[in-house]
Image (spheres, rainbow, N blue to C red):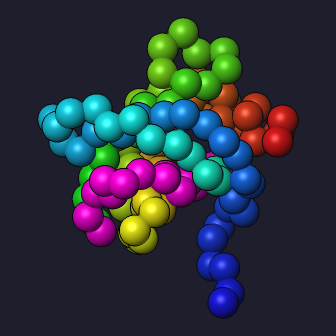
Amino acid sequence: MRDHRKHPRKPVELSLAFRIGDGPRVDARCRDISLGGMFIETASPAPFGATIEVLLSLSGLKQPAVIPSIVRWTTPEGMGVQFGVMGARETHALTELLGSL
């Protein structure tokens, strides 16, 4: 199977949360991440095409980053999301994280 991702993903173990719309915060784990997206391990994946907010603690940021994302695929174990537009601080913190992996 060929990988068509623009940004290669790196394996990682991170705690995070996500929210669908104004819904409740759902705690989950990240299995891999790139500048373009991540795989979120959760027993409650959002449906394909859903817009979610990923809440991720990143080094150098006082508050968790809130990253708008779109669900691009799902499995029984979780979902693959594509990140939307991030601010400069969030992008820098994510780039630093990826450089340390």
For image coordinates 30% across by 68% down, the residue present is 48
88 vs 45, left or right, is: right
Question: Which residue does the image show at 48% across and 14% down from the upper left?
Answer: 63
**Left or right: 73 in relation to 37:** left
Q: Is residue 43 magenta?
A: yes
**Magenta span: chief secondary structure:** loop
Rendered position, 41 above or below 73: above
Q: Does the magenta stretch include residue 90?
A: no
> Along the line of sight, which residue is nearer the eye, 15 or 93?
15
**Where's the C terminus, which quadrant?**
top right
Residue most toward the right?
Answer: 100
Residue 72 image offset from top left, x and y in percent: 40, 68
Task: Examine the image and state in which quarter residue 38 appears.
Answer: bottom right
Q: Position of residue 90 (x, y in %)?
A: 56, 29
Above or below for 93 versus 101: above
Q: In this view, does 87 lie to the left or right of 69?
A: right
Residue 64 in the image, given as x and y percentages of width and height? 48, 21
Counting the numbered discs, the total is: 0
**For the point 23% across and 45% down, which residue is it?**
20
Q: From this viewpoint, is residue 62 visible? A: yes
Q: Nearer the viewer, residue 75 or 80?
A: 75
Query: Which span of residues is magenta-colored?
Result: 34-48
Query: Is there any visible trace of residue 70 in the rendered image?
Result: no
